[in-house]
Structures are given as structure tokens and as C-alpha cells.
Amino acid sequence: MRITVETSVAAPIDRVWRAYTTPADIVKWNAASDDWHTTKATVDLREGGAFSSRMEAKDGSMGFDFAGTYTTIVEHKLIEYAFGDRRAEVEFVPDPNGVVVRVVFDGETTHSVEQQQAGWQAILDNFKRYVETQQKL
């Protein structure tokens, strides 16, 4: 099953792209809730390059590495990656107010579609807030 989440970010494409692909930015926005955070991120942004984000509960009770390999990179337009036996695509689509960021990913069987969609959407909402706040600085 494929699941889609998206948001519209009021910022130029170069800023949106940079925030999505730079480890120093990723650790500031990559969390689905306030009690989680990303403690470390690595990005080798090229086809065949690896990425990893260490996601942990702030109370230290659990954590995991969200990691995979980039399969397609089209600067300012598309990032495709594989993580385990699953795949995801991130599209960056210009619109009159900035950039629509759309993520389509393979769901898994442990959590409901609604839970997965809510979690990935929450991360994307954090991304939007982070980029738009940085725009004002």
C-alpha cells in the first residue's frame, strides 16, 4: 500500500531543498511528536548514497535508525530512496506560494495506515514550520 502526505512551504525551492537534505537542518525538524527528536543525521546526497537519521524518545526509552539508500536524485525536484524493502519518493513542486513537498511511501504492516500517515504528516508539518521560521530570521 502506498501512503501520501504533503504540505505547502512558503519559501524558495533552494531553501526548502537545503533544509530537507542538510544534516544540521534535519536534526531540527525530523520528529513526529514533541517527545521525540533526531539526535544525528548523515546524508550522502547522490544516487547510491546512504542516509541515516537517529530518532530517539527524549526520555531515552527507545530509538531507531531511519536509514536507506538514495535511488534517484533530481536537484530541486525529486528524491527517491529505498529503506529496507520499502521505497519512498519526495517531490518538490513549485506553486504560487512556494513549494509543495509531497512524500509517497510504502506502508508497513505493524501500524495502521492512519497511524503511519499521521506520523509522516507530523514530521512534514514540523519541516514546514522549521523552514518558514528560518525564512523570517
Image (tube, helix red, strand yellow):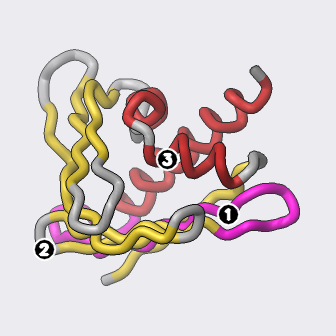
Q: Evaluate if marks 1 and 2 touch, with contact meaning CB atoms under 8 Å apart.
A: no
Vertical relation: 42 (above or below) 61: below
Can you say which quadrant of the picture contains the N terminus? bottom left
Residue identifier under label 3: 20
Residue found 60% across the figure and 33% down from its top: 130
Q: Position of residue 73 (x, y in %)?
A: 41, 68
What SS does tag 2 mark? loop
Label 1: how many Cα within 10 Å (few below 14, some 14–19, many 20+): many
Vertical relation: 36 (above or below) 116: above
Label 3: how many Cα within 10 Å (few below 14, some 14–19, many 20+): some
Residue found 42% across the figure and 62% down from its top: 117
Q: Label 1, label 3: how many angstroms apart (C-alpha)?
A: 13 Å
**N-terminal label among 1 and 3:** 3
What SS does tag 3 mark? helix
Circle nearer the viewer, 3 or 2: 3
- Magenta region: which residues? 93-114
Label 2: how many Cα within 10 Å (few below 14, some 14–19, many 20+): few
Residue found 44% across the figure and 47% down from its top: 21
Vertical relation: 85 (above or below) 12: below
Q: What residue type is disc 1 on?
A: Val
Residue identifier under label 2: 85
- Nearest the camera: 60 or 132? 132
Q: Label 1, label 2: how many angstroms apart (C-alpha)?
A: 27 Å
Task: State which quadrant residue 137 falls in.
Answer: top right
Which label is found at residue 100?
1
**N-terminal label among 3 and 2:** 3
Q: Position of residue 8 (x, y in %)?
A: 70, 57
Q: Position of residue 62 (x, y in %)?
A: 13, 30
Circle nearer the viewer, 1 or 3: 3
